[in-house]
Amino acid sequence: MAQGIRCALSLPLICKDRLIGVVNFSGGPPVAYSEEDIALLTGIAEQVAVAVENSRLYRATAERVSELDTLFQFSGILRTAGSADNMTPLSKAGLARSKCTTWRPQATPGASPR
């Protein structure tokens, strides 16, 4: 006879009052989880939730650092060019393709369009 899952315990992964997932513990032989088992596994679930949230925050921070680095590089190009109108088409195209969504080229008043 094939042995399947005969006991299971599911615990929520909660971080900052927000459900971010569920961790499941299961086994073949039927057992009742003791209060000590549940307390231990709850502590593990809490640590997993913190690790998952820290990973998400790290990834978001790394993306933001990359965006800010791109903006810094293009601000140097813009400082050198003096205005967006004097930027090379390659520089403008590079900025438009970047992940940065905070910069929009604007014509300088009185400048001729390119």
Image (spheres, helix red, strand yellow):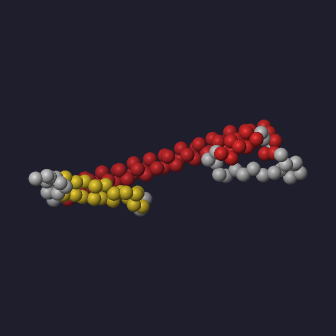
Total tally of numbered discs in the picture: 0
Q: Residue at x 49, y 46 (%)?
A: 58
Is residue 37 visible in the rendered structure shown here? no
> How far from the left and from the top, in percent, is residue 108?
83, 50
- Foreground residue, 113 or 87? 113
Q: Residue at x 14, y 52 (%)?
A: 3
Is 3 on the left-hand or right-hand side of 109? left
> How far from the left and from the top, in percent, is residue 13?
36, 57
In the image, residue 61 sits, relative to residue 33, either above or below, namely: above
Is residue 29 visible in the rendered structure shown here? yes
> How far from the left and from the top, in percent, is residue 54?
44, 48
Q: Residue at x 30, y 58 (%)?
A: 11
- Foreground residue, 25 or 42? 25
> How far from the left and from the top, in percent, is residue 53?
43, 52
The residue furthest front is 1
Q: Residue at x 59, y 42 (%)?
A: 66
In the image, residue 78 sits, relative to residue 7, either above or below, namely: above
Is 106 on the left-hand or right-hand side of 28? right
